[in-house]
Structure formats: structure tokens, C-alpha cells
Image (tube, rainbow, N blue to C red):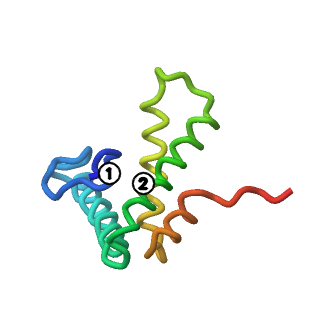
Amino acid sequence: MIMELIRVVEAPGSGGPGAGEGRLGVYWEKRSAACRRAVGKMLQADPQGAMLALFDATVEALDEEWCASERSYMLFNEVLRRVRQRVSVALRRPGTSSPVDFRAALLPSPAKA
């Protein structure tokens, strides 16, 4: 449900942003399916902690994006759109099989001084 709230993982047949006929709809379904598979694997490996870890990393990315963008609340949807893209890319990244991998893909390490 948390991933549906940020529209990274749509329930099959729910009519995501690119759903419907044509190449865009097929692309959206494949991308969404890849995200569902990644989340499913994480939940199988750690049913208790995986969702909390995914939620925590996603909220941290949202906070990071919000602070870095210096946007007003009127532009929150733009910040949320960027976080959705980051989460989707992190979930589909090869090798993302655990919440630790997801966090590493989503939140770049801070630069060392």
C-alpha cells in the first residue's frame, strides 16, 4: 500500500499513469511489475522489517529532496514526482534485493570531507 500511495507500484489493472493501449501502457506495466517483484522479494526475505525499512528510506528521500529543492508547499507535487522516480529506479536497479540495497540505491552516501 505504501508503494501505491507514492504510485511506484500500481495494483495490476489499476490503470496507472501509462495504462491503456499502446507502447506507453506496456512500458508502465513492465516497470510496475519490476517494482512489485522487488518489493515482493524483500517482503519474503524479511516480512517484519522490510516494509518499515522501505518506508523509512522513502520518507528520508522525500525529506532530502524537499530540503534540497527549497520549494514552497505549493510545489510539493513536483518534489513527490521526483521521489517517485528515484524510488522506481532504485527498486528496478539490478542487485536491489534487500532493504539495505534499496536504501543504498535510493540515498547516495554523503560526500566525505
Percent position of residue 25, x then y: 22, 53
- According to the picture, the residue beneath numbered tag 2 turns out to be 55
Question: What residue is shown at x 81% (from left), y 59% (from top)?
Answer: 112
Question: What residue is shown at x 43% (from left), y 76% (from top)?
Answer: 97
**For marks 1 and 2 on the same chain, the one whose residue lies earlier in the sequence:** 1
Amino acid carrying label 1: it is Ile
Asked whether the residues under the numbered discs 1 and 2 touch, taking CB atoms below 8 Å apart as contact, a structural biologist would say yes
- According to the picture, the residue beneath numbered tag 1 turns out to be 2
54 left or right of 31 in image: right
Q: Crowding near pointer 1: few (<14 within 10 Å), some, many (20+)? A: few
Q: Specify the quadrant that holds the C terminus.
A: bottom right
Q: Crowding near pointer 2: few (<14 within 10 Å), some, many (20+)? A: some
Amino acid carrying label 2: it is Phe
55 left or right of 17 in image: right
- Give whichever of 101, 20 is nearer the camera: 101
Question: What residue is shown at x 62% (from left), y 35% (from top)?
Answer: 67
Percent position of residue 14, x then y: 15, 50
Give the image quarter of residue 36.
Answer: bottom left
